[in-house]
Amino acid sequence: MALRHWIFALSLTLPAVAARAAPPEVDALLVLAVDSSSSVDRAEFALQMEGLAAAFRDTEVHAAIASGPKRAVAIALMEWSDPSWQRVGVPWRVVRSAGDALKLAEEIDTTPRLIDGGGTALGNALSVAVRMIQSAPFKAERKIIDISGDGAQNLGRSLAPVRAAALKAGITLNGLAIVNEEPDLEDYYRAALVGGPESFVLRAADYADFTQAIRQKLIRELSVPIAEAPQPALNLAALAPSAPAERRTKSEARQ
């Protein structure tokens, strides 16, 4: 009887222990926030998605993903435009291998446009991306939000306090400025949007240039600095000086 009681108590305890278990660890959390406002026509939106899919098929991007100690990253994709228009196109996906990256590329390729039109509410988009990072079911040292767009904020929540909150939470904000309509957008992103450790802005001349720009961006933001990357074990024997050759015996010297 006592044994049955013990087994029953254990069955109640195990789920609670599992619930308290630490979340899976990855090297980085990355939210890809893609502009889907009225300034982005259907062809331009398709070029953004095709560029992202192509990047995740690239071997250098695969190497960047595997450069950290966990050899894994978690990635989600969100579309944004008006203050209340943010939609997750691809929920969190863990990428641990080239095969995982290719599956993600296929998923991006087949994800429909969820928002079509609206203004450029960068502050609201960033706020939702921050919440996505903070509620992610993974643990990571590096947290990154990657915003791509072709215009400065023109409505919605003020960007500055959301940016400040993101930086205080240790989130790096990177930007990809598509400057075909606003030539000074790169400067605006640099002044008003990006920030945090290793943050940067890349410039795409137009949507056709997006593919190469997003590839460079992913390689740069997912690559772990050499000093932090896992290093091969040091072979002390190989570094030791060679032992001096034994002296010839007198008999060998006389020969």
Image (cartoon, grey):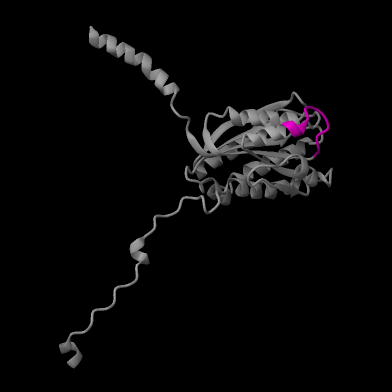
Decide whether residue 156 is among the magenta residues: yes
Q: Residue at x 50, y 46 (%)?
A: 68
- Quadrant, the N terminus: top left
* Above or below for 252 versus 29: below
Question: Quick check: can you spot residue 113?
Answer: no
Q: Position of residue 22 (x, y in %)?
A: 45, 29
- The main secondary structure of the magenta stretch is loop
Q: Residue furthest top?
A: 1
Q: Residue furthest front?
A: 168
- Quadrant of residue 254 within the rendered picture: bottom left
**Does 248 sit left or right of 138 as displayed?**
left
- Quadrant of residue 156 within the rendered picture: top right
Q: Residue at x 81, y 38 (%)?
A: 152
- Quadrant of residue 43 within the rendered picture: top right
Q: Position of residue 128 (x, y in %)?
A: 68, 28
- Quadrant, the C terminus: bottom left
**Does 200 sit left or right of 157 as displayed?**
left
* Magenta span of residues: 151-161
